[in-house]
Image: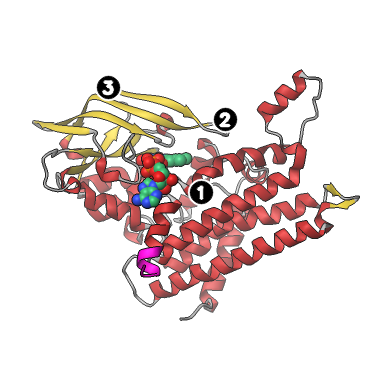
Amino acid sequence: MDLSFSTEELAFRDEVRGFIAGSLPSDIRDKMRLGWPAEKEDTIRWQRILNQRGWAAYTWPKEYGGPGWTPTQRMMFLEENQMAPAPDMQVFNITMIGPVLIQFGTKEQKERFLPRARDVDDWWCQGFSEPGAGSDLAALKTAARREGDEYIVNGQKIWTSTAHMADWCFALVRTDPNAPKRQMGITFLLIDMKTPGITVRPIISIDGTHHLNEVFFDDVRVPVENRIYEENKGWDVAKFLLGNERTGIARLGKSKERVRFAKEAASGMRAHGGALSDDSEFRRRIAQLETDIKALEITQLRVLSAQKAGESKQDPLTAVLKVKGTELLQATSELVMDVGGPLAMPDWAQELAALSNEPELGPVWATEATRSYLMLRAASIYGGTNEIMKNIVAKAVLGL
Ligand SMILES: Cc1cc2nc3c(=O)[nH]c(=O)nc-3n(C[C@H](O)[C@H](O)[C@H](O)COP(=O)(O)OP(=O)(O)OC[C@H]3O[C@@H](n4cnc5c(N)ncnc54)[C@H](O)[C@@H]3O)c2cc1C
């Protein structure tokens, strides 16, 4: 196992770091340093800048407008992007539907959708989960029946991130309710969100933002030409999509950036009569987090090293990356919130304080830290819950 980077890889990292430093618009960077989530416009603006350089579709091969990078280069790019800090690529466009179209799409589907996904002319969302079908995704009930050249879709999806701003949704639907196995009756459809019969209802999450939705389909007509792969073979497409891109799953760059920010912010805060950054308990906590980040980085390098050695099978260690990576994201967001202390009271609580004549407002980074702490509770749920990941680790890594 070789865990060191080659001279070329180190030069590549410098090139990426230099480009991001010189090209990321300062208003986006400033906002993200304060912990604000990237808005749709920020994501589109940044992704288009990267696309001009040929980097936006960072997991795609060259013939489809990607850079054709190795897994190590992809990981380096993601980490530099997160540490900048810059908005992530539109995940549904780049790491989900793009690779699916490349693998399973017809020539027409590729030509129609890939360039628009890369440049975010279309904003995609993912219609997989339903009430009663999350971890057990094959239990999904949203039905599609064929009528001539169209499917008629009826049912409900839930937790559909950004559906309210999406142009298109890729969805799993049940086309054969009598198939001998549940997985055998599912089809993968591309649905235009402007089609009559679609209703999007907001779900406001614990951080007070509108990111999630319920999506209802009521006799929604989808042309058969918008089906990916064969009818009743959608489960193969879904498995490919869910297992496809795991190198970035640990989001280590994000955790590193948050620790760096916490250290800076702590020098301006007071604890026990001195700067918080000099407090021994604070320093112990930083040391622990930095050690955990380093340990996970080494696990990530082991996964990459196996990929470099040509192992094509999905490495079950990626489940460890998901569990530990999300635990670290949660721990580092908690760290920044704790640095803010009482000033990290979220803005809706501050409005209440103002009513009771206590209008002490914290700095933006502190109140945003609480919002981000609350939102990141979900990181151990989406993308496969951590309990499911631990089941994978128990079986495939520990052999239990
Ligand atoms: C912020 C956020 C964004 C999301 N975005 C999207 C999206 O854009 N599109 C989309 O399709 N979905 C999305 N989801 C849905 C997400 O994929 C599901 O929430 C997830 O798969 C879990 O399913 P569930 O919520 O139905 O919980 P359940 O599957 O009902 O699980 C409930 C609890 O039981 C545990 N559990 C379930 N089965 C097992 C088992 N076999 N062994 C041990 N424990 C188990 C789970 O770990 C969990 O703690 C999003 C979710 C969140 C929170």
Q: Quadrant of residue 356?
A: top right
Image position, residue 319 (x, y; %):
42, 60
Q: Residues within 10 Å of mark 2 (few under 14, many from 20)?
A: some
Type of amino acid at the residue the image marks with label 1: Asp
Q: CA distance from mark 1 to mark 3?
A: 32 Å
Residue 89 visible in the current orientation: no
CB under 8 Å between discs 1 and 3: no
Task: Identify residue for label 3.
Answer: 197
The stretch drawn in magenta includes residue 313: no
| Magenta-highlighted residues | 394-400
Query: Which residue appears farthest toward the right when viewing the image?
Result: 273
Which quadrant of the figure has residue 131?
top left
**Mark 2 vs mark 1, CA separation in Å:** 21 Å
Q: How far across and down, in percent of the image, does residue 268 sit?
A: 83, 48
Q: Residue furthest bottom?
A: 1
Question: For mark 1, what is the residue?
Answer: 88
Residue 175 figure quarter: top left
Amino acid type, mark 2: Gly
